Structures are given as structure tokens and as C-alpha cells.
Image (tube, rainbow, N blue to C red):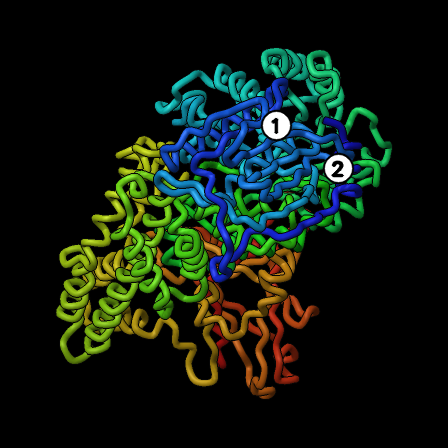
Amino acid sequence: MRTTRYVLMLSLSILLCGVGAPTPAQEVTMLDLSQAVVVHPAQMSKTESKAVDMLLDEVEKRTRIRWRTAQTMPADGAIIAISRQASNVAEGYSIRVRQDGARGVVSVVGNDARGVLFGVGKLLRLLRLERDRVRVPANLDITTAPKYALRGHQLGYRPKTNSYDGWSLPMWEQYIRDLTVFGCNAVELIPPRSDDAADSPHFPLPPMQMMEAMSRLLDEYGMDVWIWYPALDPDYADPKWVEFALKEWGEVFKRLPRIDALFVPGGDPGHTQPKYLMALLEKQAQNLRRFHPKAQVWVAPQGFSQAWLDEFIQILQGEPAWLTGVVFGPQVRVSLAKLRELVPARYPIRHYPDITHSRQCQFPVPDWDWAYSLTEARECINPRPRGMARIFRLLQPHTIGFLTYSEGCNDDVNKAIWSALGWDPDADIVEVLREYSRYFIGERYTDTFAQGLLALERNWQGPLLTNAHVDTTLAQFQAMERAAAPQDKLNWRFQQALYRAYYDAYTRRRLLYETALEEQAMDKLRAARHTGSLGAMAEAEAILDRAVTQQVAPDLRARVFELAEALFQSVRMQLSVERYQAIDVGRGANLDTVDLPLNNRLWLKARFAEIRALSSESDRLREIDAIVNWTNPGPGGFYDDLGNLSRQPHLVVGKGFHDDPDFRESALVGFAYLPTAPTSWWTHAQSLYDAPLQMRYTHLDPTAQYRLRVVYAGDSPRLKIRCVANDAIEIHPLIEKPSPIRPLEFDIPPEATRGGTLLLSWYREPGLGGNGRGCQVAEVWLIRK
């Protein structure tokens, strides 16, 4: 594997498609292959042999039919002829169905060994595989080659993942097969020591032994083997740590039978100044090539501050010969287009997109409802086919390809989307999902399951309170569930979709119920001056506690728990720390957060306890009045709950997800769980890196004076924040956010509103590295004095 091959494939590989897979609406003639014979050459490479084995095995699993094989043409009957014909277009293939006299012939011709593998994979996606029957559209005529030379996924056998650490080698082989079916040609492994625990209770093999076995297995399938290797030692300016790293990494390099490329992130994890990091990597390049002479070395400027990024680019200007290319991944402080502009042309850019997380990540779900953020959390089952396609098509042209960042099988649909688009960026996403559903779930689910996956993505769009589509999605999946055969219900991909459909619906049902309970409780508090403070609080608390004593939708909740158990049994998915020994609640264990309160119950009960301790009725009523009128800015004033999609009228949104999916020039709703605070502090609007977060007010009274009340909440409490009016008038300089969190107030100078408009801009400290977060604002009142 050489960089030149990647570049040549981009220029030489032209997608030539004839008649593809027909849509369900088309009537096509089918050729019966139930009694077919697979004809292949006597001499095959190990990759081609794996392709034939995969074809035979996967058809048998789905149909109970084991095709016979032959090395010469049988006298009669349908045949599937697999062969290779040399071509200068790497990895391409053709699939044709024709009638040869009385028999049908399906030919799969690969341009090389990988072309054979991917041709077989495409055939598997198009076959109609049913119990005791195999058919294929009789009009298939496909010639195709990949647009992008690198199409891969990171598969980390480590405790931090939500499922991978429980997989045996046969499970890994099955998953590798599944990835190749959609055109994946590379896998990135993780060494035994990373930013993780040393061991997992789920490991069937020690990490180094599994890594070695996976490298060998990938080699058999002809797939590129990458290693993601973070530089974690304390100080690479110290020669002793450099020598330690050379020895430790060298042992890994020596043991793996195949390594095509080494990728070292500059941060996330790791934190080494570029001049020391690049000096280490030059030595590691020599170290690696002692055992794998043609292996490449790649580096990413992840987590770099502006000063470190400048230093990194300056080093690249010297064009070190040992370096192959640069990786764009999470926590790179400039855009992919800007990075391509800065990096010398001799170095290709590889994409490292995070397809596995839903919040606090590179490509968060846009404006995700806070109830989902709280319960389903960061690493949930997350099919986002249209969102992933938009990210791919917008950003991928700057690169030679990708290996995605994954933490488990929760992102399985997203992997298929990226792989398919890596082959053909113009592929119809619905057709990709139909092929996914047909192959992985079953022929009769081709359209229904595909539409179900799109429905799950729609479940996450807009405020959950008003998204009645969630209930429709559940009804659709329940219909599939009722009609499912026993083996369908054992299918982990089917189980994942059901889990999400039930979880989404249960969360919405609870949100509706608990929102109504809070409103009833607030009505009791509003009547406190008539009923008395203590009685009002007692009645309000009893209403709020119904969320626990009179739970809603227990049938949906029970099914969520049943499906969680099924997923642990089928694919080792660890959806609970207590039940399945997940490493952390935040690592996909959202069964443990399924019942977290979806209203202000915890905060209100804590406030009630404080208010009851006051000695006078007037003091108690005053504090209750503050609760009831929390969002009231007074006459002529304005209030924004910036983390609430329906209460942020003055927020300057910016480009939005469609044109800015990593939110570098857009406001984004973020989340941080603060159980003792009001729910309006659990969410916030934020900007990233040095971009401002802005609010715009119009039609203000030019003769009035205003005061700003603001709550700085979020997940970056230690970063300072600054507020400026109209790009010129400082409301306050860089200040530390108060801890504990509380509202702050600042006068707005009269000259800022004299024209009847006001633009407020917030900034975090400029030039910082890390994840880019920190400019986070939860609530804003503009109060007329």
C-alpha cells in the first residue's frame, strides 16, 4: 500500500454503472440460483479464497442452501463464475447476468483480488436470499470502481468501547466480512496501551494476542491494517521517555504480521508539543520500517492550540520525507478546507470522522432535544444516514479517503453509509439502506426496515414534546416485530433498531407526562399566597413525585430492558454498568439513564427544603414567587433559554448543520447534566474555538436603560468568558465563571442600545487547544431598568 496508489485511484477510478439494483417499485425478471454452482479458478489468492468462502457461507446462513463449487464449467444449470481480469483501475469489478442457452450465468469479474472481494460483496447485497431460495435480478449489468482509495473504520479492542471488548475472533471475522460487503478496505487497530483501562472483564483474549490475530485476519482478507497509536508518555523532550516509547511500540510493530500505516494523534489523547512529537515520530518511522518497510506514517494536529498548530505547519513546510500524510479528526481547530490549504501539497489528507457519538463530539446531532441528550446520551445507537451523507459529501472531497472513529457497533448503519459513499459519493442513500436491510435483516424487510432507519433519524429532529412522529416510528417497528420470524428476533441489528424505537417512544411518553406534572405543580405554587407556602409546596411535591410513584408506559420500559438483555447476549453490547459491566455510564450504558427525571423535580424539591427552613411566611412566599417568575424579565424585557429550541428567539444561529456540520460558524445546543440545578442550566448554546456566540435584539426602546442577567453553565466551567456589545463595547472582560453556578448581572451602556438594536457577543479565551468548547451560555434576561 503506497500513497501513490491512493492518489492514482482518485484520478483513474471512474464509476461506470450500468443497470444497478432495481427499486422495489420496478418489476424485474428474476433468475433462480437455488441450484447454482460457483465456478472459480483453481489457483486463487488468499483474498479471493476468502471471497468465495464468504459467498458460500453467507448465502447458506440466510437460505439453508450450500452451493457446490467447481473449477470447470458444469454441463448445465445456473452458474456463478468468479474470476479476475487485470486492470489499472484498482479494486473495481463488474457483475453481469446473462442467459447462456438454457442456463443463467452470473459473472463476477474483479480487476484485482480486492475487486473480486468487493464484487462478491455487492452481489450479496443484490441477491434475494430467502428460506430455501436464491434469486438475482436478471438485468444486472454493473461495472464500477471506487472513488476514494481509502475506506475504513477503527475497530478498537479495548475496555472503553460499548461492545468490541466482548468480541471473540470469529465475531471479529464476521464483522470484517460485513464491512467488506459494503466496500470497506481498511481497519484501524488500537494497541494494548491507550487512554484506557489495562483490562476488561469481557476480553476473551489478552489485547496483544487479539491485535496480532486481527492483523493476520485482515491480511487474509487483503485489507489494509492501520494502527492508531497515541503518544501518552509524560515528556518526549526527555530521551529516556523516547527510548521507552521506541521499545514499547517496537514490540507491537514486531508482533503484527501486517501493518500498512501508523497514525499518531497529536492530542485526544496525548499532549506533546509538535517539535517533540515530530522528532519522536521520525524515530518511530524508522522503528516501524524495520519490520514493515513500506508502512506509512500519518499524524493529526488534534487538540493543538493556535501556537502549536503554527509550529506544526512550520515543521511541515520543511517537508520531512519520513511523513506520509496528515489526518483531520476531532479537535482540529481549523476546518478541513483550511487544513488542506495550510498543509504542503505533497502530503495527502485523510479524514478521521467521529461517526459514533451524538453529543460533545465532532459532528453532534444538530439541536438534539435535551431529553435525548440526558437519557440516550453520548454513545447511543445512532443511525444517521442522511446526516452522515451530508457530512461526507461536504467534507470528503478535500481528502484521499477516511477511516472513521468508532467506539462500538452502535454506529453500524453509519459505517455502511460511509463505506458505500466512499465507493460512490452519489449513491442513493435510500438504496444503500435497502441493500443494508435486505442483506443484514432479510429480503422481506428491504424497504420497511430501510424506511424504519430513516424514521429513527427523524425521531431526533426538533423538540421532542411536539414530535409525534416518534410514536409512528414505534408503531412501524412493532408491526415488523410482530411479523418477525424467530431468527429475525435474534438478529442484533434488528434488536438495535427495536431498542431505539422503544427507547425513543418511552422517553417521549415520560417527557409529556413529567412536563404536565411540573405544570400542575407550578399551578399549586402560583396559588401559594392563597393556600399558604407550606401547603402549596406539599401539594406541588406530591404531584412531582408521581413521576416515581405512578410511572408512565411501564410496558415500553420493560421492553427496553428485554432488548438490552438480548443485545448483550447477541453482540455483547453493554448497555448498563451494573447489569453488563460497561466501563462507564457515558460509554453507551444508557439503560442506567433511562429513568432520569425529565423535569425540574430534583431542583424544586431541593429548593422546597431550603424554603421550608425559612422562619417567616413572607420570606417563603418571596422565594416561591422567584421560582414561579423565574423566566419573567419584567415589562419591556426579554428572556431566552438558549438550550431550549423553542425559547431562543434572539440567538444568532449561523449557517447551521447543512452547511456547517461541525458547527465552526454556527451556534450549537450543548448539554451538561447538573442534577441539583434547574433544567434550563443543563443545556446551553455554545460556539466553538474562537468564534463568537451571538444574540441580536431589535426594536429596543432607544431611550431606555437595560441590564443583562446571564447564566454561564456548561461542561467547561474552568474556561473564562467575555461579553461584548455591538463588536465594540465591552460588557465584561474575560472572567471566571462562578462556581457554584448562579446568575450574573451587568449594566448595558446606553450607547449600546441607542440605535434600537443590540448585538451581544461572547468569546472564550482565544487561541486555546482542546475540544473547542467553553463559550457556553444557558440563560439570558435583557431587563428594562
- Quadrant housing the N terminus: top right
Residue 185 in the figure: left or right of residue 171 = right
In this orientation, which residue lies closer to the viewer: 187 or 652? Answer: 187
Which amino acid does the dot numbered 1 rest on? Answer: Met
Badge 2 marks a residue whose secondary structure is: loop
Residue 90 is situated, as x and y percent measured from the top left of the image, at 72, 34
Percent across and percent down for residue 262 are 66, 26
Q: Is residue 337 left or right of residue 182?
A: right
Q: Is residue 662 visible?
A: no
- Total count of labels: 2
Q: In the figure, 599 relative to 67: above or below?
A: below
Q: Position of residue 495 (x, y in %)?
A: 33, 44
Please tell me how crowded label 2 is: few (under 14), some (14-19), or many (20+) other residues with Cα within 10 Å: many
The numbered dot on residue 193 is none
Position above or below: 68 against 402:
above
Residue at the image position 59 percent from the left and 69 percent from the top:
652
Location of residue 470 (image quadrant): bottom left
Q: Spatial distance from mark 2 to mark 1, Cα to Cα?
A: 17 Å
The answer to whether residue 287 is visible is yes
Which residue of the protein is positioned furthest toward the right in this rendering? 318
Q: Nearer the viewer, residue 695 or 663?
A: 663
Mark found first going from the N terminus, 2 or 1: 2
Q: Nearer the viewer, mark 2 or mark 1?
A: 2
668 over 562 or under it: above or below: below
**Residue 89 marker:** 2
Q: Residue at x 75, y 37 (%)?
A: 89
Question: Hey, what amino acid is under mark 2?
Answer: Val
Q: Which residue is mark 1?
A: 223
The image quarter containing residue 93 is: top right
Residue under the image location 41 percent in, 26 percent down: 167
Residue plotted at (31% across, 53% down): 480
Residue 547 at x, y percent in the picture: 20, 59
